[in-house]
Amino acid sequence: MSYDQRYSGKIYDVAVIGAGITGSMTAYKLAKYKLSVIVLEKGSDIASGATKANSAIVHAGFDAVPGTLKGKLNADGCRQIKEISEKLNVHYDNCGSLVCAFGEADERHLDLLYSRGIANGVEGMRIIRGEEIFELEPQLSRECTSALFAPTAGIVCPWGLCIAVCEAAAVNGTDFLFSYEAKKVEQRGGYLEINSDDTPIRARYIVNASGLGADLLVENDIFPDGEEEPLRLNPRRGEYMLLDTSEGGIAKHTLFVCPSEKGKGILVSPTVHGNVIVGPNAHEVEYRDNTTTTPEGIDEISAGARRLIPDINLRASITEFAGVRPTPMTKAKDFVIKASKRFPKLLHAAGIDSPGLACGPAVADYIVGKLGEMGLPLRPNPDFSDSRPPSPCFKAMSDEEKAAAIRENPAFGRIICRCETVTEAEIVDAITRPVGARDLDGVKRRVRAGMGRCQGGFCSPRVTAILSRLLHKDMYDITKKGEGSEILSRPDDRD
Amino acid sequence: MDKLIVIGGGPAGLAAAASAVDAGVSPEDILLLERDDSLGGILNQCIHAGFGLHIFSEELTGPEYASRYIDRLHEREIPYVTDAMVLSLNADRELTYVSPKDGFIRLKASAVVIATGCRERTRGQIMIPGTRPAGIFTAGSAQRFVNMENKMPGKRAVILGSGDIGLIMARRLTLEGAKVECVAELMNYCGGLARNVAQCLNDFDIPLLLSHTVTDILGKSRVEGVKISQVDENRRPIPATEKIVPCDTLLLSVGLIPENELAREAGVVIDPVTGGAVVDQYNQTTAEGIFACGNALQVHDLVDNVTLEAEAAGAAAARYALSGTKTVNYVATTPGDNVRYIVPHKIDLGGSGDVKLSFRVTSTIRGCDTVIKSGSKELRRIRKRVVTPGEMESATVKISDIDAPVSVSIEERA
């Protein structure tokens, strides 16, 4: 059965456009109610836009101006991410963060951040000085004079978090449609119709969580409070380097410099997988999909990283990447979560830039609340199961568990990804799970095959073969990240 | 007795295991562990000829060369497990491995030979800017697709780096009907063997662009082109020279890195220049009873050299397994002018016979001498027509001649 027949025959209660952090969390929260929900994603997988390429940190919530949505939602989101990660077994670490001050001007800024944090409900913050800083962070530059320590901050696997909540939503009946770009919304009798070429999807309510494309779904339709012009999003690119796990431990907390007009500056942070992440810079780019990395950008983030940790070994970079954030061009620089001017049952969630990841679950609660105000009946689903099927992680097992796992299923004894010790059984699971992996990047994000120091050199031919086998697809049709990114080149027809 | 364990079933591991039996260890006291599903290692995908000229005086393909050593393993009835991945190794030579057949196994080894080969340097490590589409392959993974899966990675390729696998793949892709636009090399010399430039590039009119690099990758889903620029003497791109080369595939042959995660875990000291273990002339690492050979020790140019090195390591591991440790009296080896590294890193003067010193030079030099000294005493001077970084050099010295640290240098002749 083709997608269109399966999904276009019914009228959903809610269609969520976008499976980034905002869309994924919204789908998860909506699954708790008696509602039929479909998630429409332009990319080939969950978290394939701005959510996949960011600092992977859970901000504590002291940056935002009190009273803004960011200010209201961040501390709650931060708390919820910890809770959801524990419940759904997502890689998360409550490592805490330090905003490092270099001199007096910076120190005044720390006081401002501290007071904002108090107003925003951030718990446990302290300004620390002298030796205490270096006890917490021995490799930190000795130029650092004081630091704002926020123990509630953390790090998370952004796509792992989204995949987990989407799986939980899918287990409770939510539908997912990938490689579907919502291009047009129209009002039909009692419902809205979304179109992508000739594949209509019908829903009574729509949540527009389409990230970088949020202002384009319906033209000139989002009017932020206090603004006369409709919302325009500005693509702002941030470049990153990811260092080998051999460098893990060089930073124990997420280390920030004091923020500037352009953003929170270049940070150095551990990741939940034991790597070190460095970045981002912040440059406006012309195209929304411009995720190229540049030599100038890498130089810029290298210099930023050395300011925090002078001895950081940037030669241990295993990959460089860039993400584009949807920065709202408004005075408040706040999230814009507002009903459409034209379609009363369409809710826009636009301009979800940093700290959009940390705010995710709280933004979703806010969205669900708004939908309720717009008339969506929110009757709790008594059958809701707040869980997802367990995903085996061979590397994390004890020796005894490893032995037992292989006895049970010999595919646990076949290591496909050498660098990250990923077994065939885990790759099979990643592909066959609810909302499972359909391409090489999907496998990589779910089980880390290809994420390590050889970057898929050894395992990509084997993962391609496994995808081909399980998806009943020709090897030539296996892609890196959706149509057009085929790994191999089909031979031309010969006469 | 505990088993002598050989980690890796490529050319190095195969030769080491056979040699250990020939040195007196009984086959049932040996176990060879191979992580892939068949023996032979990277040779299985090297279907071109050119292997074995030195040892067999004939030109074999990779699989043919491997099969000769697989036969030796079978003739000696040496046990081996394929699909077996070693998960841990410590300095007491305790290791764990898994395989679908054996499950999870913990062993204590009488001696260990690390023959884990190497991996390819990636795009991220050399920091090529641009987008991240499909169509970027390391030369070796493209080789696996073409030669083992019978699938082509693309139709129009640019190859960055002139390592041997890149040169071989330029020919391979051309023979399979793809167009190879060029091979770009950052350095001002070729990274691979001169014979491969002649046979793989020149014979097919594929240009080798020395002092060039890829400065941008274009294309969102699949590679649509790359930008190539000439670089100055400091290897920085010269902006005015940038040009776009349309292609759907970028192959990287930009260096090999010895795979030494296990050695590191066992506390073995690694030479930052070679990326391999620090060893003595018996190929023993700084961890007693743990030996290293093949591309895990140093990246070789010819498999014949791998075999010889591995046979020495296997024999030494056998001696250790049978009779344990001996007191040693080490002198160091130090790279002199124009020499990047020397293996072994130290020489036990209690040994006898000759020591073979392997080394690579830092740049191409014509009309020169290899000079080996012990302290200030010149032991040997060998006339060379030309030396290049792409080819391994070696020389032997008599242990009885050595009484002080040994240095090797390349001196230009006036």
Image (tube, coloured by chain):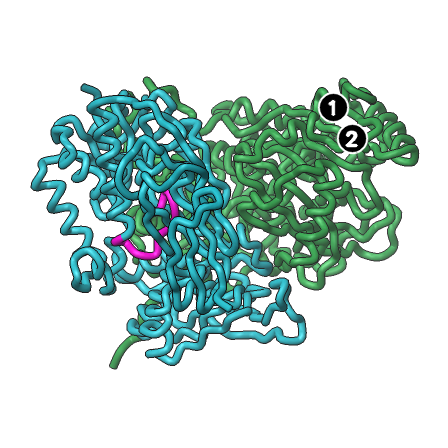
Chain colours: A green, B cyan
Range of residues picked out in magenta: B294-304
Residue at 80% x, 27% y: name it.
A147
The crowd level at tag 2 (other Cα within 10 Å; few <14, some 14-19, many 20+) is some
- SS label for mark 1: helix
Q: Is residue A401 above or below residue B201?
A: above
Residue matched to label 1? A134
Nearest the viewer among B65 and A368 is B65
The answer to whether residue B300 is magenta is yes
Residue at 44% x, 68% y: name it.
B367
Across and down, in percent, residue A150 comes to 75, 24
Across and down, in percent, residue A221 comes to 75, 55
Left or right, residue B171 beside residue A68: left
Residue flagged by tag 1: what amino acid is it?
A: Phe
Note whether residue A371 is visible.
no
Residue at 92% x, 36% y: name it.
A105
Residue B166, by quadrant, is: bottom left
- Which image quadrant: the C terminus of chain A? bottom left
The answer to whether residue A418 is magenta is no
The numbered mark, 1 or 2, whose residue comes first in the sequence reads: 1
Nearest the viewer among B394 and A167 is B394
Q: Is residue B404 above or below residue A252?
A: below
Nearest the viewer among A220 and B35 is B35
